[in-house]
Amino acid sequence: MPQLSSLVDWKPLILACFGLISHSANVYAQAPAAPPPREGLPTLSGYMEMHLNKVQDLPTEVDLHRFVLMIGHSFSDRLKFWSEVEVEHAFVEVEGGEETGEVAIEQAFIDVMLNRRFNLRAGMVLVPVGIINERHEPPTFHGVERTFVDTVIVPTTWRDTGVGAFGDLGRGFSYRAYAVPGLDAAGFSAEEGIAGGRQQGGRADASDPAVTGRLEYRNTGLTAGASLWRGGAGFGLIRLDIQTPTVAVSSLDARYRRGRHELRGQWSMVNISGAADLNRALQMHTGLSPNIASRLLGAYAEAATRVTPDSWSDEVVVFGRYEKFDTQNKMPAGFQPLQEFQRSAWVAGATYYPDPDVAFKFDVIRERNKSGVVRAPWQINLGVGWWF
Amino acid sequence: MLLKCFVVLALALGPSPQALKPSSPRVIRVSAERFAYTPSEITVEKGTVIEFHLTSEDTDHGFRIIGTEVDVQIPKRRRGETVVKYTADTAGRFIIECSRPCGAGHTAMRATLVVK
C-alpha cells in the first residue's frame, strides 16, 4: 500500500491528468505581501513643509509653512470621500486686522463612480489648472517654494465649492470639469493678480458662476495638460454700475521623465475683460487705483536630473528653472504698467530624498524686473517636506 | 497496484503532455504615479494568465482589482516591484483602483481591465 505521503505527492499529477489544475488558484501575490485592507475604514494621510527663507534686505525667516491632514473614506466601491485640512504658518491670530496664518479646508468632496468615462464629484474641489494646484505634495516638485507662475499667475492652492464630472477617455486621455462660483474682482491686485479674488468656498457668492476643466494626456513618461477657467468676477461690484468683468485663465503644461532626467514646463495666461472700468470703479470706492491689468502672463521651464548612482536608494536631484511672470502684461487703455511687475527669475537648487516621500530642499533664486527703481531681491531657501 | 493502473489509464486517455503545460503568463507592466496608472486600460483574452509587474514613480500605491482577491501594495519609487498573477477567467470590465491613499487625486486613480 502506498504511504499517505506518496499519495500526496501523486495528487498534482493525477489532477493534471484530468486537466483540473492551473486555473483553480487564480490569484497570488509574490513579493511584497498584500497590505492589510485600508479602504472601508477612514484613512489618514498628510504632508508638511517647513521653510527657512533668506530674502535680500529682509530678516531670515523660519516658517512651518504648511501642516496638512487628509482624511478619506470609501462608503463603497462607487462612493468615495476625500478631504484636506490645512494649517498655514503654524497658528492663526488676527493682529491689527491682519491674519498671521490660515486654517482652511482645501478639499472635501464626494465622488460618485459611475463608469470609466463619466463620474461625478461634488464639494470643495481643486481647480484643475496647471501642474502644482492638483499635485502639491512637497516631494512632487523641486524648489522650496512653489513656482512664481503657480503663485501670482495661477493662484495655488486654488479651490472652491463646485460640482462636476471626471473620467478616463481612453488612449491616455482623461478629463475633469466643474462648475464653481466666480471670483471677486474687488480682491484683484497689480502684484498678485487674481489671487485675492478667490472665494475659497466660505459663503461664496454663486451669482456669477464659472466653469473650469482640464484635458490631460499620459503616455510613458509624458504627462501633458490643457486647462481652462472662465467665469464672472463682478458680484462684489454690483452697485458700482460697471460692466461685469469676466476672467479667463488658460494654461498648458507638460512633464516628461526618462530615466534619471525630468523636464517640465508650463504656460499660463489670465485675461480680465472690463479691467479699465474695474480700475475706475475700485478707485472711486477706495480712493486708489489698483492698476489691474487686462492680461497676466507667465511661463517656466525646468530641467532636473538625479546625480546619485542607481545603486543608491537615497537620491539627490539637482535642478534649474527659468521663469517669466508678468502681472501687467497688457494694460487696459488709459493705464500704464509698472515695470517692477515684469519679472523673471532663475532658480537653481537640489533636492535630497532619503525616502521618496521625504524631501530636503535647497535653492537660490535670482529674481529680476524691468524697473530701474524697485530692485528685485535674490533669495536663498532651505526646506524640508514630507508626505505620509 | 490499483493506483498505478489508474495513473497509466489517465495518462493514456488524458490530454497530451503539450496541452498539460500551462501557458506562459502574459507579462503586463504597469506604472503608477499620482494619480494614474499607465496604461490605464488593459485588454486580455478570457483565460489569460496575467503577470502584473507593478512599479511606482513616486510614493507607494495600491493595486486592487475590484471584485477579485487582488489587492497589493506597489512599493515606492526605486524600491522594487510587486509581481502579482491573476487568471482572467471571467469576461467583463474590471475596475482597478488605488487602495492606498496617495494624495489629492487618490479617489480618481483608476484603470480598467477588459477581459474579452
Image (cartoon, grey):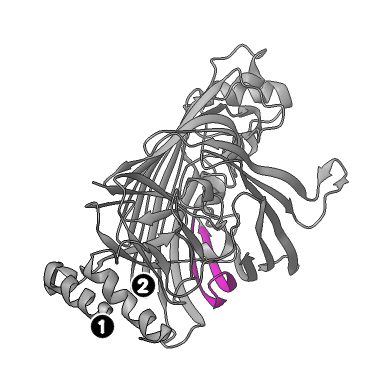
The picture places residue A242, in percent across and down from the top left corner, at 58, 14
Residue type at mark 2 is His
Q: Is residue A14 left or right of residue A349?
A: left
User: Principal SS element in the magenta part?
Assistant: strand
| Residue A68 is inside the magenta segment | no
The magenta stretch spans which residues?
A344-368
Which residue carries the number 2 mark? A261
The picture places residue A117, in percent across and down from the top left corner, at 36, 36
Which residue carries the number 1 mark? B1
- Which quadrant holds the N terminus of chain A? bottom left
Q: Is residue A73 left or right of residue B39?
A: right
Q: Chain of mark 2?
A: A
The picture places residue A256, in percent across and down from the top left corner, at 34, 62
Residue nearest the viewer, comparing A9 with A213 = A9
Q: Residue at x 29, y 47 (%)?
A: B114
Q: Is residue A15 left or right of residue A38?
A: left
